[in-house]
Image (spheres, grey):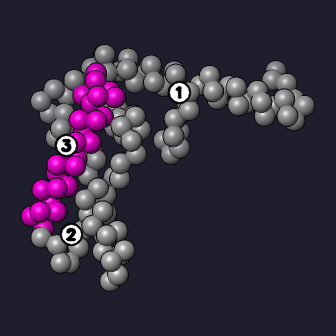
Amino acid sequence: MTLAEQQRALVDALVAGGDVPAGFAAAGVLATRAALRRKRAGEVARAWPFLAASFGEQWYAAFGAWAAGRPPQGSLRDGWDFARTVQDTLSPLARDELAGREAAFSYDGTCAPVPRNRLAARVRLLLSRHGSRPA
């Protein structure tokens, strides 16, 4: 295995739930993985404070369990994806937080969120280039 392959395997083990690669101390990799998940949960909590607050003391455990095996997508997307999966259990403030993001951004769950005003501007630009006007 080349150095690049070893590095990819280590990163996969740390952030995407991959197996601990041969030649690495499992305890160290697992401890680092847990620390990185906790850091990720903290970043998401800063971007989604009501989401995190709705879980209280269980925030790190709940988010960490969801994040296991999922590579990071950034705190906005990670929080959004998590909120969508647990939306039936959210507090009213967290549901409002999610609804506000859904209203302000267009997000399909695969590509980065786009502010709706920018999305409308892009549509108008594309339509104007093709000689069409919105109805």
As measured in the structure, the alpha-carbon distance from the residue carrying label 2 to the one carrying label 1 is 37 Å
Where does the image place residue 66, in percent across and percent down from the top left? 27, 45
Which residue is farthest left? 27
| Label 2 or label 1, whichever comes before in sequence order | 2
- Label number found at residue 38: 3
The vertical placement of 73 against 76, above or below, is below
Query: What residue would you read off at disc 2?
Result: 20
Report if residue 88 is visible in the image. no
Q: Which residues are magenta?
A: 26-52
Magenta stretch holds residue 51: yes
Q: Which structural element holds mark 2?
A: loop
Q: Residue at x 16, y 41 (%)?
A: 61
| Label 3 or label 2, whichever comes before in sequence order | 2
Quarter of the image for residue 33 reads: bottom left
Q: Residue at x 70, y 26 (%)?
A: 121
Q: Which structural element holds mark 1?
A: strand
| Image quarter of the C terminus | top right
In the picture, measured across the screen, residue 30 lies left or right of residue 66, that is: left
Q: Residue at x 34, y 28 (%)?
A: 47
Where does the image place residue 118, in percent across and percent down from the top left? 63, 27
Query: What residue would you read off at disc 1?
Result: 105
Cβ–Cβ under 8 Å for marks 3 and 2: no
Q: Amino acid at mark 1?
A: Phe
The vertical placement of 1 against 121, above or below, is below
| Label 3 or label 1, whichever comes before in sequence order | 3
Q: Amino acid at mark 3?
A: Arg
In the picture, measured across the screen, residue 55 lies left or right of residue 102, that is: left
